[in-house]
Image (spheres, rainbow, N blue to C red):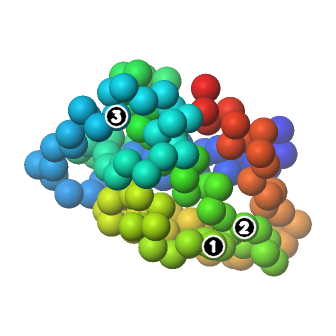
Amino acid sequence: MTHSRLLFLTFLSIALLTACEVGKKVDRTNYDHLTIEELAKGDQLIDFSDSMLMGPIDINKLTNDDAKIAKAAVYRIYSNLELKDNQYLFRVKDAEKLHLSERVFDKYVKDIEEMNAHVRKEDEMEKLEPISSEYLNSLLK
């Protein structure tokens, strides 16, 4: 696994579940009947529960419902990134268009900007890889 791929996957794990508002409850009834793919490609608003936003969490330790929501959000974010000059750029810069809560979208924007800054500061040989369709499809399982 390349260094940039490892960095990308590590970043993804951390970005999924870091701190934000406390006390927020998420209505899961909108997600229950949907598959990961239906949720990822649908127009239901995705928000994370507080427990998912309280710090780094191993996606393998999430409940099935939380894992489904996290994968769907990551799919929506990463399918709207492009790689240009070794930096990830958002094609869509509006939470509403991606059907994500502002707090989830803002966190991803911040985390992507931090990763881009890290790559700029590190070794010029460190190259980010484009988001592959294989990777995006793996999130749908």
Mark carried by residue 91: 1
Q: Which residue is mark 3?
A: 31
Give the CA distance from mark 1 to mark 2: 7 Å
Q: Dot 2: what SS?
A: strand
Q: CA distance from mark 3 to mark 2?
A: 28 Å
Q: Is residue 39 above or below residue 12?
A: above
Residue 141 percent coordinates (x, y): 61, 26
Q: Amino acid at mark 3?
A: Tyr
Q: Nearer the viewer, mark 3 or mark 2?
A: 3
Q: Please state if 19 lies on the left or on the right of 96 as rendered.
A: left
In x, y percent, where is residue 74?
A: 53, 48
In the picture, residue 77 is in which quadrant?
bottom right
Task: Please indicate whether residue 103 sits to the left or right of residue 88 in the image.
Answer: left
- Farthest residue, direction left: 23
In the rendered image, residue 57, in percent from the top left (x then y), is placed at 41, 36
Which numbered tag is attached to residue 82?
2
Three-letter residue code for mark 1: Arg
Residue under the point 37% across and 48% down = 44
Look at discs 3 and 1 and give the one toward the viewer.
3
Is 123 drawn above or below residue 20 in the view shown? below
What is the CA distance from the residue labelled 3 to the residue labelled 1? 26 Å
Tell which of 31 and 10 is nearer to you. Answer: 31
Residue 9 place in picture, x, y as percent: 65, 44
Q: Residues within 10 Å of mark 1 (few under 14, many from 20)?
A: few
Residue 10 can be seen in this image: yes
Amino acid under label 2? Glu
Element at badge 3?
A: loop
Look at the numbered disc 1 and give the secondary structure of its residue: loop
